[in-house]
Image: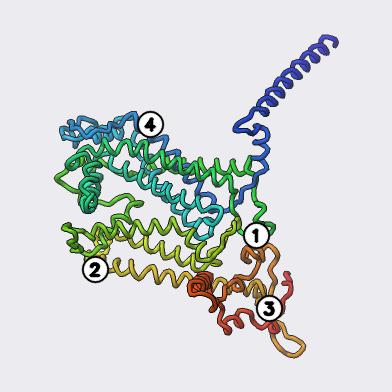
Amino acid sequence: MRRIASETERTGDRGRRRRSVTDRAAERIGRITVLGHRVDDTWAALRRRRVPTHWTNLFGIVTVASIVVVTVTGILLMFFYTPSSEATVYDGSYAPLHGATVSQAFASTMRVTFDVPGGVVLRQAHHWAALLLPAAIVVQLAATFFTGAFRRPRRALWVLLLLALIAALASGWSGYALPDDMLSGTGLRIVEGILLGIPVIGTWLASVLFGGPFPGRIIENLYPLHVVVFPGALLLLVALRALGAWQHGPPQFPGRGRTPENVVGVALIPTAVTRAGGLFLVVTGLLLLISATVTVSPIWLYGPADPGNAGAGSQPDWYTGFLDGALRLVPPGWEVVWLGRTWTLAILAPLAIVGAFFAFVAAYPFLEEGVTGDRGDHHLLDRPRHAPTRTGLGVAGLVFVGVLWAAGGADIIATAFSMSIEHVITALQVALVVGPFVAFTVARRICFGLQRKDAGLLRHGYETGRIVRLPGGEYVEIHQPLDETERARLATPDGAPPADRRATGSTVGPLAQRLRQSLRSYYIGGPLEPERAEEESGDSSREVVGPISRR
C-alpha cells in the first residue's frame, strides 16, 4: 500500500507539472501582441462578436470556396502548363491528333488532360470553380442592392465588390484563351476585331495585346495577366472588403430586439466559423464531384487553334455572354465618317453602353444618397418592398443584362426553336429597349401592393375566416393580431407601417429644390391618393380583433 501511494503521489506531481507547463505556455501565448492587440483579448473579442444568420450571408463563403479551389488548382496546373505559342508536333495519348502541328500551350494542356494522373479532374475543377466564382459575386451584388446594404457606411464595400466581379471576369477571360484550342482562338479573333474597331488607339491596343499580327504572342502576354495581375487584384479587393466588413460590422434585417447598435445572431467563434467551414467543405466537395463527372471545355474535340479557321457555334463562358450579346444586337451598317476617320458604332455603341451600365452600378449608392438626401449610417437592411423604386431599378437592370446575355446565344436559340436568326435578333433588340421599362413598372407596382398588404396586417392582423354576429345583428370577421416578432419583421426599420413612410411633394422653394423634392417623392413612393389611403386604413368598426381559439 505504501508503494502504490508513492506512485500515485509521483503521478500527481507529474500531472501538476504538466498542467503548470501548459498553463504557463497558454499564458505566454496570450501575452503575445499582434498589431497592438494581445492574443487573449483578440480571442475573447472574437467569441463575443455576433453574426446574423440569414441565407444572403452564405454566398460570401461560396465566393471564398471558389477562390480557394481556383487558386490551388491553378498553382498545381502551373507545374504542367507551358505558356508558349511555339509550334510542336503532338505525340501524346490522344491518337486522333497524332502528328498534328499544335502550339506548346495546346500540347501541354492535352498532356495534363490525358497523361497526368488526375489531370482532367484538376483542369475541370479549375474551370468549374472559375464559372461559379462570378455567379456567387453576382448574387452577392444583387442581395446587397435589393436590401440597401450599400448605404453608408458601406458604400466603399459596394464599389470593392463590383471591382472584384470585374477582376473575376478578367481572370476568367484571360484563362479561357490559354489552352489555345479552336474555341478560344475564335474568341480571340473576336477580341482582335473589337480592338481594331476602336478609332485612333485600336491598332495600337491590338498590337500591344497580341504582340504582332494575329495570333502573335497572345499566350505569352495573357499568361502573366491570368496568373499574377488579375488574381492578385481579385485577392486584394476581397481582402480589403473583408477588412471593411469587419470594421463596420454586419448589417441585419429589422426584427425583434434588433437595433442599429446591436447585432442579433450566433457567436462568430465557434458557431459561425463552424457553419462557414462546413459550407466551405460542401462547396469544395461539390465542385470536385462535378469536375469528376461532368465534362467542361473538351479541347480534344475542338482541336488546336488555327488563325485561318473559326469554330462554328462557338459560345463564350456564361459570364462574358452579355458582352458578346451587346455586339450582336447592334444594327449592321452603323458607321460614320468624322475627322477623316471611320467610326464604327457597331463596336463603340456596345462598349459605351456596357461601360455606362457598370459606371451607373458603381455610382448608384452615391446617386441614391443624393436623391433621398439620406446621409446617415444604416445598419438595418430594407426589405425590397420597402424601397419600390430601388427594387424596380434592380429588376430593370437584371432584365437588361439578361437580354444581352440571351443575345449572346441568339444563334443557338434560332437553331433550337427553328426560327430565323433575324427575327430572334429583332425580338431581342425590342426587348432590350422595352423590357427594362416594363420590368421597372411591374416590380415597382408589386412592391406597392406588398406594402399595402403589410400595412393592413400591421393595422388589423390576419384574417381568420371566422364570422361572428354582433349584438346589433351585423356579421363581422375576427382578425388575429400579429405578435411582436411578426410586427417587427413586417415593419420598416423606423417602426412605421410601409405606407406611412411615403414622402409628400413640396411646391415651394427654388426650382432646383422643388425638382429634387419631387424626385425624392417619386423615389420613395409619392403621396397616397385619398381613396387609396382610405382603402388601406379600412373601417375598423367592421372588424373584430381577438385571439384564435384552437381546439
Give, as a three-letter code, the residue at label 3: Arg
Report which residue position mark 3 lands on.
466
Residue at the farthest bottom position: 472
Q: How is the image coloured?
A: rainbow
* N-term mark: 2 or 4: 4
Q: Are marks 3 and 2 in contact (CB under 8 Å)?
A: no
Looking at the image, is mark 4 or mark 1 nearer the viewer? 1
Query: Which amino acid type is shown beneath numbered disc 2?
Result: His
| Between discs 1 and 2, the one toward the N terminus | 1
Residue at mark 1? 255
| Callout 3 secondary element | strand
Q: Earlier in the sequence, mark 4 or mark 1?
A: 4
Does label 3 or label 4 sit earlier along the sequence? 4
Residue 516 locus on image (x, y percent): 50, 70
- The x and y percentages for residue 366 are 49, 59
The quadrant in which residue 326 appears is: bottom left
Q: Residues within 10 Å of mark 4 (few under 14, many from 20)?
A: some
Numbered circle sitting on residue 76: 4
Whether the residues at callouts 3 and 4 have beta carbons within 8 Å, the answer is no
- What residue would you read off at disc 2? 423
